[in-house]
Amino acid sequence: MEAKMETSGGTLVDVIDRILDKGLVINADITISIAGVELLGIKLRAALASFETAAKYGLEFPSGTNVETAAWKEALVAKEDCPQCVKRVPVEELISTGCPWCGWISAKARAVV
């Protein structure tokens, strides 16, 4: 029996895609003090995510951000990966009609036809 080893390495594009898909949060408190006297205090809060991920988790955006654009409305639509081609497709479309990219059809859509 032959053991199959799977590598977990990926390209830079894979890493960036995963970070944008899942999100990355940095939370740091830095203080510089001498003899118990705080001279400098820095609080760093940063989040890196795609608009879709940020909207999904309710992250705040800078004031003046226009969330009424078509791109924002598209980001708020729930999406899933197609089981065949793994492209992101709106859940309702994937279930009711199938994948527009590869032609995969869900069991529910097949039952209707």
Image (cartoon, rainbow, N blue to C red):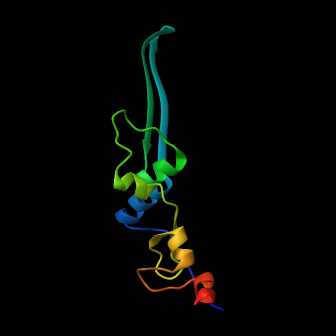
Residue 111 x, y percent position in the rendering: 63, 88
Which residue is painted at 44% across and 30% down in the image? 44
Which residue is painted at 54% across and 69% down in the image? 91
Q: Is residue 77 above or below residue 31?
A: below
- Residue nearest the viewer, comparing 65 with 1: 65
On the image, which quarter does residue 66 sit in? Answer: top left
Q: Is residue 110 above or below residue 27?
A: below
On the image, which quarter does residue 33 sit in? Answer: top left
Q: How many marks?
A: 0
Which residue is painted at 57% across and 76% down in the image? 95
Q: Residue furthest right?
A: 1
Q: Would residue 20 be visible to someone looking at this image?
A: no
> Where, quadrant-wise, is the N terminus in this rendering?
bottom right
Residue 31 x, y percent position in the rendering: 46, 20
Which residue is painted at 47% across and 79% down in the image? 99
Q: Is residue 62 above or below residue 87?
A: above
Q: Would residue 10 be visible to someone looking at this image?
A: yes
Residue 93 x, y percent position in the rendering: 50, 73
Residue 19 x, y percent position in the rendering: 44, 55
- Residue nearest the viewer, comparing 66 with 45: 66
> Where, quadrant-wise, is the C terminus in this rendering?
bottom right
Q: Residue furthest front?
A: 112
- Residue nearest the viewer, comparing 58 with 69: 69
Q: Is residue 60 above or below residue 107?
A: above
